[in-house]
Amino acid sequence: MTVKANNENQQFQESASTEIWNETPSDKNPYIAKQCYLHGYDIMELTKSRSFIDVLFLLFQSELPSPDQARILETLMVACINPGPRHPATRAAMNAGVSKANHEHILPIGLMTLGGAYNGASEVELAIDFLTKNNQKKPNKLGTELLKDKKKLQGDWHIAPGFGSYYGDINLMANELVVVLMQLPGTGPHLKWGASFVSSISEHANLGWLHTGVVAAVLADLGFGAREAAGLFQLISAPGILAHGLEQNHKPIYAMPLLEDKDYVVQARK
Amino acid sequence: MSFKQENNYSDTFFWDQRRNKIVSSIGGWQGGKDVVSYGYSLMNELLGKKSYMQMIVLNITGRLIEENLAKWFEGNFIGMSYPDSRIWCNQVGALCGSSRTTVVTATVAGILAADSRAYGGSQTSLLGMTFIQSALKEFKKHASIEKIISRTKFKNEKPVIVGYARPVAKDDERIKPHENMTKKLGFNVGEHLSLAYAISDYLEQKYALKMNIGGYTSAFLSDQNFTPEEVYQIKALVVSSGVTACYIESKNSPPDSFLPLRCNDVLYTGKAQRSLPKTD
């Protein structure tokens, strides 16, 4: 029995449902699957002829990608496989690793840190919203409008989700990735619009693509939704985060800095 | 207007200042001597003299609150500690137990699950307090309750306001004990709570909706001069005890025995079985 929901028009369902995965039970044990189908395709058949990228795309989109779509997604995933040891998410995993957290905790710790609204998964979600809301507008005009909103900020300025400065400058790697992606057949309208937007804002300030914006634009072009994109950003960044965390885990606890008292300044107040 | 650098080198002064250095306005450890939080000595002024709830609020807000308010928070945390593994966050804890994760994994996963706009007491406090504080500002500018409600989001012709409709049951068994606790600890009904009652009456008459515990606590804590963000931070752990309880029960049962599912217990509504297209 399930509980009746608060609204008289709604009721909690008797069972969960999915359009993604179908399991055929074994004849002698209803808890054991003898065949599994992903959006209608036998998973064992997929193992024989399809790449991980193809199946990942299928998982979220219910259809296999075209060769162009698969190439674009693979390019993005290779480029974003490692946020690098200076990204806060990787550093969180490295800190957990070096301080001997359980090994299975290292990746979730990094991915939770990667969930943030600043260079993280939440920003990817917001960037898709920004791109889909504005991609019918003229990028030059919008860029000029947003540049007027520059406030006196300490640190970086994200003029819009997925776009801004990185340590006061243009993020060269993110912008180089866009150059690579734009050369691929099948590049979509969100990436092209974003490139025009970046041209307009970078003329006036040290602003450009951020990795979150590139991931958002590519995933939007491939048909992924904003919620899916947030999680996929975590997924595609996971290998690097895990590798760096485990690398430190193999080292002694003093292999990373712990600041001395002289470098930890408390501004006392009461 | 140009923000572009005039020379060949970028200005990285902001970041250079912060390399290999932490400046804290909250406090820190003074190796071998003491620990300070907002100017209070952890070892001499807090430990053994103040409650853990006072410490939590101090670390988050810088305010060393009175004992009665700390007791109120503690009561509120008790009221959110349901050891019932049907509740979403607790079910996460139970599934962790069934999978034999560590207790910390289970508790963190459960808290994370309850970081939700729909339930859980932490993020819902952020939303509920934002509503009641904004509503009071409007009310003081002579907006009627009807007008205030009309400006909120509607779904199925009913207003959707965090704090004024509980997801599962209409009557919230937590409100009365909270009201009793509030009175017993010497608090009066403040202007936010007074407005919350009036809104609840209006919603009940017009939409058959009532204030739930989220609405009550949001209004009470607004009257105690907390910001929505502060209460979100204070109540980050509010469901943790219930999650841990459900983890333990499940961990002490045979593995993978928590609500087992047969293949057909998950209803498949997707595409029919199909053959893979041929590739070159």
Image: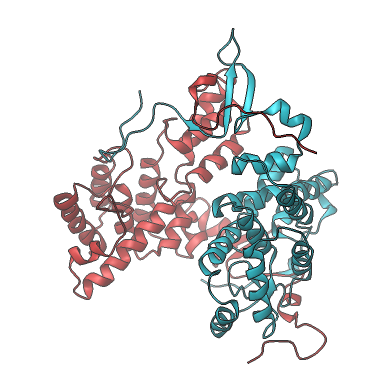
Chain colours: A cyan, B red
Nearest the eye: B120 or B252? B120
Q: Is residue A119 visible?
A: no
Point 51% across, 20% down: residue: B264
Residue B26 location (% of width, % of height): 57, 66
Q: Which residue lies furthest to the top in this view?
A: A28
Along the viewing direction, whichever of B107 and A261 lies nearer the viewer: B107
Using the rendered view, name the quadrant where residue B105 is placed. top right
Position of residue A37 measured from the top left corner of the image (x, y, whole percent) = 62, 27
Q: Is residue A18 left or right of residue B77?
A: right
Left or right of B114, for residue B139: left
Q: Position of residue A222 (x, y in %)?
A: 64, 53
In the displayed structure, B78 sits above or below B141; it is: above
A26 left or right, relative to A264: left
Identify whether B9 is placed above or below A227.
below
**Which residue is drawn at the image coordinates 41% and 58% (left, top)?**
B126
Extreme residue in the left direction: B205
Q: Where is residue A128 in the image (x, y as percent from the top left)?
A: 57, 61
In the drawing, does residue A41 fall left or right of residue B61?
A: right
Image quadrant in which you'd find residue A131:
bottom right
Numbered label tally: 0
Q: Along the line of sight, which residue is nearer the eye, A13 or A186? A: A186
The quarter in which the N terminus of chain A is drawn is: top left
Specify whether residue A85 is in view: yes
